[in-house]
Image (cartoon, grey):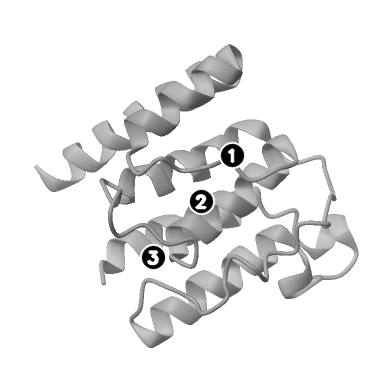
Amino acid sequence: MNTMMFSDLQQDINKVCHTPAVCGSCAGKDCLVGYSKYAIADCKKRESSWLADGNKNIPSIDMRGGYDEDDVLNAIAETLYYCHSCKTDHTDDCLLAITRHAMEIIETGEMRDYPGTPLEYLVNLERDDKVKGSALHELYNNVKAKQADEMG
């Protein structure tokens, strides 16, 4: 398991989180962000990339709202970066899918299908919503460039 992936995802999800100062108290796994934090921590602890029934247990009725759109889209871009090309091995119980789905619910109110590659995902989103799709594509390119700078 890529420890940098866990760290990057955790940082991005922490930026999305309202914190108890805004929410009043932390709802934990009953919150889309809290559930993402839980999934990341659990997978990191178990050194695994998936969570049994992880997708099924996403609290899809949690609609707190008021999240920063750039932070949410950046978290999605980060998941896309790490989900290079799992077309044949894709599972919705993968940590990346769980985190992406939770952020999609925050951003659009629903989970999007993942066709197996980031590029196909971005093309489909741009076709459905030009503004969000273009913004996410730019953020994805920024994440790729940042990762390339850190590695080289």
Looking at the image, is mark 2 or mark 3 earlier in the sequence? 3
Judge left or right: residue 81 versus residue 24: left
Quadrant in the picture for residue 21? bottom right
Ranked by sequence position, the earlier of labels 3 and 1 is 3
Name the residue type under label 1.
Asp
Identify the element where label 3 is drawn. helix
Q: CA distance from mark 2 to mark 3?
A: 10 Å
Task: Name the residue tied to disc 3.
Answer: 6
Element type where label 1 sits in the image: helix
User: Dividing the image into 4 quarters, which one contains the C terminus?
Assistant: top left
In the depicted structure, whether residue 59 falls above or below residue 16: below
Q: Is residue 138 above or below residue 121?
A: above
Q: Is residue 84 above or below residue 142?
A: below
Name which residue lies at 33% across and 43% down: 81
Q: Position of residue 91 (x, y in %)?
A: 42, 62
Disc 1 and disc 2: Cα gap in Å?
Answer: 7 Å
Could you say which is closer to the camera, residue 104 or residue 18? 104
Three-letter code, disc 2: Asp
Q: Position of residue 49 (x, y in %)?
A: 37, 71
CB of mark 1 within 8 Å of CB of mark 2? Answer: yes
Q: Which mark is residue 125?
A: none
Q: Would you call the spot at circle 1 few (<14 residues within 10 Å), some (14-19), or many (20 or more)?
A: some
- Identify whether 125 is placed above or below 148: above
Q: Residue at x 55, y 35 (%)?
A: 73
Q: Which residue is mark 1?
A: 71
Residue 138 sits in quarter: top left
Residue that badge 2 annotates? 12
Q: Which of the two labelled residues, at mark 1 and mark 2, occupies the earlier sequence position?
A: 2
Residue, x 51% and y 80% (percent of image)? Answer: 52
Provide residue 53's location: percent of width, then percent of height: 57, 76
Disc 2 residue crowd, few under 14, some 14–19, many 20+, Cα 10 Å: some
